[in-house]
Amino acid sequence: MFFGYSLAIRCVEAIGDAAFLTSSFAISAYTFPGRIATVVGILETFGGLGFTAGPAVGGLLFELGGYQLPFIVLGALLGVAAVLSYFLLESPIDQEMKNTQGMMSLLRIPLILLLVLAVVVCAMSLAFIDPTLADHLDSFNLSPVLVGLMFLWCGGIYTITAPLWGYLIDRYNCAPSLMVFGAILAVFGMFFIGPPPFLGIEKSLFSIAAALVVLGIAIGALYIPTFQACLDTVKENGFPDNFETYGCVSGLFQSAFSFGGFFGPTVGGFAVELIGFEWTTTIIAGIHFLVALPLIAYNFISYRRRKKAKKTQPVMPVLSAPLLDTSGV
């Protein structure tokens, strides 16, 4: 009975989490249209802080009040947040909501499919590490504290650098280039966490930690620009710049991330059982490489478009006139 109720509650929690995340990204994009990437970076930073602090705070509450106290405290905090959101957040007023083409129209855009794939691969890589890295570190006989610190290399670096990527995108309009940088860097990060058996290199704590740092940087650089790139792409394909479009993109974005978060530990864990951690990370590195190839082409096309747009911009004539009217002199 307990298991059934727990499963039902988790399903309800998943529905609420999906609704909350989807609406938060859509509202943020609608409220800050000129700073979307920066807002996404800030949201990811606080999300990372929550994931990092969650086990520690939950463990402390568990020691203080037993199994129920963490859920009571977090439930109360979520209730307060819901009430504040209801009264403080304004409902978007949009006059063009009837013109949105719908969710399925998004999936007919090839570039959207590529960006969705990039999000899936990012989430898959992050989620794969959680259940498998500890076993990979068993041979070093680390204490639980040191094992936890190893996990922080990837998630911590991602959390710290997320606002930086958002700022760079909004400041320099470099989303395509940043995604290529992240995709290529992710190849090296996943490649050397193992490392692959065919290289003949023995694993070490230093190489694994360095690879986790590289992976944290890479995932942030690849993931943060995708939401902005999705919005830019749908607008270029005739979607109106309104709240419903933001909602559709946000829903697709969160679905892709959730699918990657499910796919990584399940299929990745099964692969580790069959072929080992080293070969599994090598395969994931290969997937990142396959994603990087079309992203490089996308970056090249975007660069050509920007260069062509600059050339076709009309040049305003410079009118020269004397500073003083000397006609009467």
Image: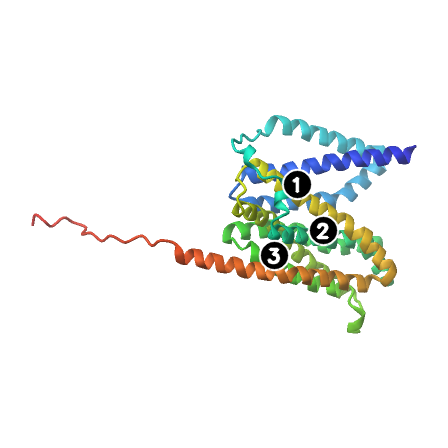
Circle 3 residue = 179
Distance from label 2 to label 1 (Cα)?
15 Å
Please identify the quarter of the rendering in which residue 154 is found.
bottom right
Identify residue type, mark 2: Ala
Front of the two marks 2 and 1: 1
Circle 1 residue = 251
Looking at marks 3 and 1 on the same chain, the residue that comes earlier in the sequence is marked by: 3
Is 296 placed left or right of 13 in the picture? Answer: left
For label 3, the crowd category at 10 Å Cα-Cα, with few meaning under 14, some 14 to 19 and many 20 or more, is many
Q: Quick one: which residue is furthest to the bottom in this view?
A: 200
Q: Position of residue 95 (x, y in %)?
A: 51, 31
Q: Position of residue 73 (x, y in %)?
A: 77, 32
Q: Residue at x 64, y 51 (%)?
A: 113
Q: Position of residue 244 (x, y in %)?
A: 59, 36
Secondary structure at badge 3 equals: helix
Please identify the quarter of the rendering in which residue 270 is found.
bottom right
Distance from label 3 to label 1 (Cα)?
21 Å
Front of the two marks 3 and 1: 1
Circle 2 residue = 123
For label 2, the crowd category at 10 Å Cα-Cα, with few meaning under 14, some 14 to 19 and many 20 or more, is many
Secondary structure at badge 2 equals: helix
Is residue 211 visible to us here? no
Q: How is the image coloured?
A: rainbow
Q: Quick one: which residue is furthest to the right in this view?
A: 1
